Amino acid sequence: MNNKKLAVRYHLLNFLDDRSHSRTYSTRAVAATYCVAAQNDAKLYSDFYSGLFASNFQPQEGGAEDRTDGEFAQLAKTVGAGAAVITCIKSGDDLGTAKTKATNGYSTLSGVNANSTPFVWDGVTSVNYQDPAWLTRLTG
């Protein structure tokens, strides 16, 4: 991504909402990623996205608690996001966008006969991301 050999398009889904304590965790996490994406910085986005799945951040499915919008904002700040991103996350500005784009993401998956996540494509061709050399093959 950083050397412009690869463009990544994320289609984020919110199917884990029902397995979160708040019943909104996935949607709020997706909304936070849109706030971060608005800064147009691929490294920042990648760092934030990875942070969401870090073992010290991602809550347990079915757990007694999950992350707050303030904690999403703190993660964004930790990876270098600016004040506008922090405000966007804390205010929930992109919740509507998150819901709409998650719905569209399900349609995209269905359209390419994908039945699980993650799923990687090169154009319209499915990529075996389990193969350790998949990225080298794409950017080779």
Image (cartoon, rainbow, N blue to C red):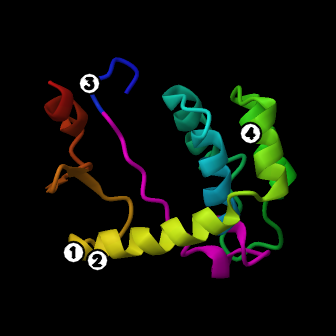
Quarter of the image that includes the C terminus: top left
Q: Secondary structure at mark 1?
A: loop
**Residue position marked by numbered label 1 in the rendering:** 113
Please identify, in this view, whether the residue under mark 4 or under mark 2 is nearer the observer.
4
Which residue is the site of mark 3? 5
Q: Residues within 10 Å of mark 2 (few under 14, many from 20)?
A: few
Outermost residue toward the bottom in this view? 18
**Type of residue at label 3?**
Lys
Give the residue displayed 75% in from the left and 29% down from the top.
82
Residue 1: x, y in percent? 37, 27
Q: Where 29 sits versus 64, above or below?
A: above
CA gap, disc 3 and disc 1: 27 Å
What amino acid is labelled 1 in the image?
A: Asn
Q: Is residue 106 magenta?
A: no
Q: Which residue is mark 2?
A: 110
Secondary structure of the magenta portion, mostly?
A: loop
Q: Which residue is drawn at the image coordinates 65% and 71% (left, top)?
A: 61
Disc 4 to disc 2, C-alpha distance: 31 Å
Q: CA distance from mark 4 to mark 1?
A: 34 Å
The residue under label 4 is 85
